[in-house]
Image (cartoon, helix red, strand yellow):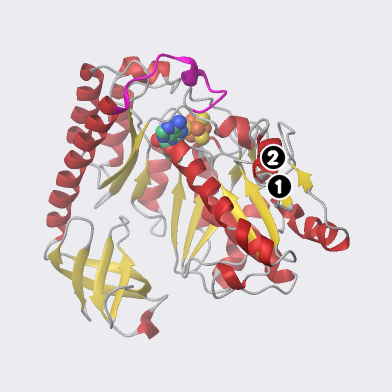
Amino acid sequence: MNVHESEKLAGILKNRGYAPAENSQQADIIVFNTCCIRDTAEQKILGNIGAVKKQKKLNPELIIAVVGCMSQQKGAKELLQQKFPYIDIVLGSSNLHELSSAIDKILLKRHFFSNVDDNERPEIIENTPVYRTSGTNAWVNIMYGCNNYCSYCVVPYVRGRERSRQPEAVLDEIKTLIDGGYKEITLLGQNVDSYCALSDNGWNFARLLENIAKIDAKFRLRFMSSHPKDFNKDIVDIIRTAPNICNNIHLPVQSGSDRILKIMNRKYTAEHYLSLISYIKTLPDVGITTDMMVGFPTETDEDFELSLSLLKEVRFSNAYTFVYSPRKGTVAADMPQLSADIKKQRITRLVALQNAISAEISQEYQGKNFEILVEDKNAKYDGVLCGRTESGRLVNFQGDAGLIGQFVNVEIKKTKAASLWGEIYVGK
Ligand code: 5AD
Ligand code: SF4
C-alpha cells in the first residue's frame, strides 16, 4: 500500500515536470511518505526527516514534504512542525493528491502548508497519476481505510472508514494496465474480502475476481490482504477455476491463541482459521503466507506455544513476523505490556521456526518445473534474472534481460532458504 502511494506521489511530481534525482543531495523536492503501523517505522522516518535539516539550510529553495499516515495521527502535524520547522508541506494519506496544489502554494509564498484530511470517510479520488516502479507488476487499490479496529492497530484511526472503489473504475484501470503491457496485477486493500460489503450494488470480492479473471489476456492476478473473518470458500473456488488468479494467498493470522485473538478483536478462532487453510490447500501448489505477532499484552508462554503450533501445522511458505508495538490511541496500548526481553526471546524463536519451515518447503520445489514471470535482473549476480512462481516463490536463473516481462518455464536445480535457483527449459 505504501509503495503504491509513493508511486502516486511520484506520478504527481512527474506530471509537474520533476524527474527522479540521482540522490537526495541533488533533489529540488524531497517527499517523505510515512508509516505509523509500528514504532520502528515511525522512528526511522523521524530520523530521516532530521537528516535533511542541514541540506535545507544550505538550500532554502529545497521543498520538504511529509505525507502519509503518520501525519494523519492526532497532533502529529503540530508535532512535526515543532520538531522540524523547516518542513514545507504536511499532507495525510487520504489527501496526497493535493501535493501539486500544495507545491503551488509553497512556490507562491513560502509558508508551512498543512492539510491533513481528518474526515472519517474521505472521498475516493480517481485518476491520480501513477509513476509505476514495480516492473511487470502493477498495484491497484480496490478499497481504502478499515473498519475492523483490531485492538493493536492504528490503521482505522489514520486511514478512516472502509470505502470501496466502484467496480467499473477498478476494471477499467486493470484493462488499461494490461493493454499497456503489465503482466501482473496485485489488488490492494486493508481487507479485500469485504470489498463492497458496505454498499448495496450487488458486488463482492468473489464477483470482482471473477470479472477481472475474464479479461482476455495472459496475466497474473494477486491480492492482499485478506482477513480470516471475511475470507471464504467462494474466493478459493474462483481461484480454482480461473487460471490467471494465482494460487497464492496471504492470510494474516496474528496469533494461534483464541484468548489472544479475542483480545485482539480479530473475530475468528484458530479452528476457523485452520478450516480455511485446509480448504485453501485443496488448490494445487498453493503458496500461503501470513502475518504473525508476538508480545501482545498478556500473551503467556502457553499462548505463544499455540502460535508456534499453528505455524507448524499450517507450514506457511513465508510468515511476516512482528513484535507487538503499542500504538497511541489503540485499545491494546492501554493494557499491561510485556517486557522487551520476553518479546525478543519470542520473536527469535518464531523467526527460527519459520526459517526452518521455509527452508523445508523450498526443498519441495527441487527438480520440479514452474512457469515464471520474469521480473528483473538479479541485483547481485550478472546475467541472472529473477521472477516468481505462481505460488509467489522467488526463483533465480540465467537468462537474457530481454526476457523481463515474459513468462518462461524454469526447472528448479538448487534451493536456498529464501530463494530457489533454476534453469530455463524449452518444451513441455
Ligand atoms: N504492532 C506490531 N505489528 C502490527 N501490525 C499491525 N499493527 C501492529 C502493531 N501495533 C502488523 C499486523 C498486520 C501487519 C500489516 O502489521 O501483523 O497484519
Ligand atoms: Fe489493522 Fe485489523 Fe484493519 Fe488490518 S484488519 S488494517 S490489522 S485494523
Given residues 396 and 81, the one toward you in this image is 81
Q: CA distance from mark 2 to mark 1?
A: 6 Å
Residue at point 65%, 33% (across, down): 160
Q: Residue furthest right?
A: 108
- Residue 369's mark? none
Task: Count how many numbered circles sit on residues in the image.
Answer: 2
Q: Is residue 226 visible?
A: no
Circle 1 sits on which residue? 85
Magenta stretch contains residue 329: yes
Residue 255 relative to residue 85: left or right: left
Residue 71 lies, in percent from the top left, at 65, 41
Q: What is the span of residues highlighted in magenta in the rendered image? A: 327-340
Residue 118 lies, in percent from the top left, at 73, 34
Quarter of the figure that contains the C terminus: bottom left
Q: Quadrant of ligand 1?
A: top left
Circle 2 sits on which residue? 82
Residue 22 relative to residue 395: left or right: right
